[in-house]
Image (spheres, rainbow, N blue to C red):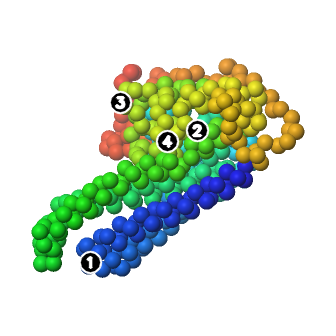
Amino acid sequence: MWEQIRSNQIRSTVLAIGMGALLVLIGYFLGLYFFDNAIAGLVIALMIWVVMSLFAYFQGDSLLLSISGARKISRDDHPRLYNIVEEMKIASGLERMPDIYIIDDPALNAFATGRDPNRATVTVTSGLLQQLNRDELQGVIGHEISHVKNRDVLLMAMCGVLLGTIVILAWYGSRFLIYGGMSGSRRNSKRDSGGQGQIIILLAALVFMILAPIMAQLIYFAISRKREYLADASSALYTRYPEGLASALEKLGASTGQLKSANQATAPMYIVNPFRQQGMKASDLSSTHPPISERIRILRAMAGASFSDYDQAYRQIHQGGRIIPASGIAAGAPPLAIKRPEAKVEEADKIGRARETSDVMWRLSNYKTINCDCGTRLRVPPNFKGSTITCPHCGRIHQI
């Protein structure tokens, strides 16, 4: 799969250069207008580009995790999730165990980030942990681990930070030009006749307002949907069970919850598009991802669990074409059988998963837990001022 890794490295470079070219263009015209010196605008724009590119490379993952409200966990916090990530790490051949984060949100979604496999993280929502059984969760984690393996995570971090920079500059720049540019037009009135200064202000504001959505669309086009197909194929290979991811995608597509922390800059990172109309399913929203129904059909059409099986299923659904690079399909490789699903007795039921998830979120929020003799669990918030608490069921008084 070295072609895909190389492709992602090239895309990251092209993306940074393209963003820089746009910022330089903006800086040229703003410098010409505000400073009467295009060179000053170019220098400022180049400085912004260099600083944000370096920040995106070295700290982009930390910023994206902070924006999403993700919290890091350890093995003791959620053993089931930790074990699944560890299994997929071994299956994929990664040398380092990715850090694991949880977002306290009932929406079903997940993403991976980090500039390379040695600085990778996997993040899931609390809603995902509650709704997916072990096979399904394993399929999702396998998908995200493959993004780490294929170096998709650097591309995502660069996209998120640089796109966010463009949107912020466009928004605040347009507001400055509209509301604060009148004084500038008066300053330019001596050299501008017939209200030309005012026209320049309005045109510059219009350019700023248009740039943000255009750049958003360009980023989405630059991030090929092919990476999602490849991640699905890798998940099937790592888990040896394509139905696990297919069933998980079915649940994600049927969910109606909005992911509160997602925005236009971070949307491409998630396993499914986090945006939808209120109360609507995500089934085939595809501005940043392939249609979920199509991904499910391909996974369920696989005769085995290898890259070759996925490629064959893809060509069957699409009536031709190829999705797996030649290096991913070994000539003469034996077929890889699909494993049997986990026994149902080993699965935590839905109530158990909900309790397991809520317990870890309470701990991450620094709530204290007091177990009453009557069987009641009392949750004490970190800002509670009292020294005792009374059980609402049996009336026992507990010291805090």
Which residue is tagged 1?
35
Which residue is tagged 4?
288
Nearer the observer: mark 2 or 1; the answer is 1
Q: How far, Cα to Cα, is label 3 from label 1? A: 46 Å
Does any portion of residue 120 appear in the rendered image? no
Please say if 354 is above or below 6: above
Closer to the chain start, of discs 3 and 2, is: 2
**Callout 2: helix, strand or loop?**
loop
Q: Where does the image place residue 223, in percent across and percent down from the top left? A: 54, 49
Q: Residues within 10 Å of mark 1 (few under 14, many from 20)?
A: few
Residue at point 49% right, 36% down? 286
**Callout 1: helix, strand or loop?**
loop
Residue at point 40% right, 33% down? 276
Which residue is tagged 3?
278
Closer to the chain start, of discs 4 and 1, is: 1
Which residue is tagged 2?
78
Q: Where does the image place residue 187, in percent across and percent down from the top left? A: 14, 75
Closer to the chain start, of discs 4 and 3, is: 3
Residue at point 26% right, 62% down? 204
